[in-house]
Every structure is written in C-alpha cells, then in structure tokens.
Amino acid sequence: MFTGPFINAAAVLLGGVLGAVLSQRLPERIRANMPSIFGLASLGIGILLVIKCVNLPVMVLATLVGTLIGELCYVERGISGGVNGLRNVLQKRRGGEHALSGHEAFIQSLVAIIILFCASGTGIFGAMREGMTGDNSILIAKAFLDFFTALIFATSLGIAVAAISVPMLAIQLTLAYSATLIMPLTTPAMMGDFTAVGGVLLLATGLRICGIKMFAVANMLPALVLAMPLSALWTAFFA
C-alpha cells in the first residue's frame, strides 16, 4: 500500500480548501516571497539526492541524453498543449470572446499549477521511488511544499486548486504501481544512480521556482527512464 501519493494529494486538497476560505486575507508579501522558499527547499532535497550517486558518468550521461530526447520530442510542449486543450474547453463553456478576455488570467494560472502539481519532476520521481523502494520521503517533502503552494494559489483561484488533487493522485499511483514491476530487476548501484538523476531534476526544479533559470524540467524526464539501464551497462562493462 502506497502512502506518499495519498499524503501529497491530501496536502493539495487541504491547502486548496484553506486557501479558498482565506481568500484575499493572506498578505501580498507572503504570496510574493514564499515561492522562493519552495524553490530553496527543492534545491536542498536535490543536493541530498545527488550525493547518492554511485557512477558519476551515468548520472551525467543519463541527464544529457535524456534531456536531448525530451527536447527532440517536445515533452514539455506536449504536456502544455494537452493542458491548454483543457483550457480551451473551459473557455468555450464559459462563453465566447467575453470569456477569453474575462477569464484568461484565471485559466493561465490554473494551467500553470496543473502542470506544477501533476507533471513535476519531483512528483514523478517521488512516486517511482516509493514504488521501487517503499521510501515515501520525497512525496512527503513535496506534500509540505504543495500544501503551501496550493494555499497561496487558492487565495486567488478558489476551490478549483483543490480539485487538482484528484488527477495528481491518479498519476502518482499509476507511476508507483508501475515502478513495482521494475524493482526485482534493480541493484543498489542502479538505485543510487536513479536517485542521483532524480536529484538533478529537483535542482532544476528549484532553480526554476526561484526564477534563477527556467529549465524545461518536463523535457528532462526521459533521464529517469535512462538512468537504470545506463547504470547496469556501466557496471557490466566499465565498473
């Protein structure tokens, strides 16, 4: 039984509801300053995971080749396109050109947090890690961050933020259960290299949240798929 996805989803649900209740009562300086703290926390988690690397060349190669594949396949653009399709449906239901102008800011912000919660490197890596090792610490740490993120966004977007917990839970549970099939084939070295590549993605996520460098983190996700096979090959032929 996986607990991390449920904890993470509950945090988004609770944060969204609480933010909707607080509405505009949250001071603007808190809304402006807290995202940087979220990014700093993500950087800290990333550093702790990167140092678990067993084969440094594997971490570097998986990150480089995986990101190249993601860029060539336009992974982030594809995710954004799918969510934008949902945005267009919502706009049409709200009614014509008036909706396009009156609700554009709302829809754009909603699209951003759907991607943040459902397609983030942290959530995908955390769910896969729990599925393979039973360690839910990444998703629990993400739950703390997502609670406050959902709270802040919900003060302006309302209860719609809480509803994002449903697809997020479904995605993370699917990834966790899929990862259980991989576990019997892994070695400690493969797990260490996989964890380190996940740490690199968390570093990129933290830098993006802080506004230091806008990495296309979704385009880096194929690196997680490559990490274990490359680690096994490296151990077999070079270690």
Image: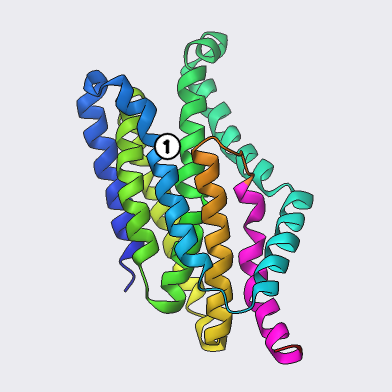
Q: Is residue 186 magenta?
A: no
Question: Which quadrant does the C terminus fall into?
Answer: bottom right
Residue ID at (61%, 66%): 224
Q: Is residue 142 above or below residue 17?
A: below
The answer to whether residue 103 is seen in the rendering is yes
Percent coordinates x, y for residue 178 in the rendering:
51, 72
Residue ID at (50%, 13%): 99
Q: Look at the magenta stretch and give its main secondary structure.
A: helix
Q: Nearer the viewer, residue 130 or 177?
A: 130
Question: Which quadrant does the N terminus fall into?
Answer: bottom left
Percent coordinates x, y for residue 179 in the rendering:
50, 74
Q: Is residue 124 left or right of residue 237?
A: left
Residue tagged 1: 36
Residue ID at (46%, 70%): 129
Amino acid type, mark 1 = Ser
Identify the image's colour scheme: rainbow, by chain, secondary structure or one colour.
Answer: rainbow
Mark 1: few, some, or many residues within 10 Å (few <14, many ≥20)?
some
Residue ID at (72%, 83%): 234
Q: Quadrant of residue 162?
A: top left
Q: Nearer the viewer, residue 92 or 49?
A: 49
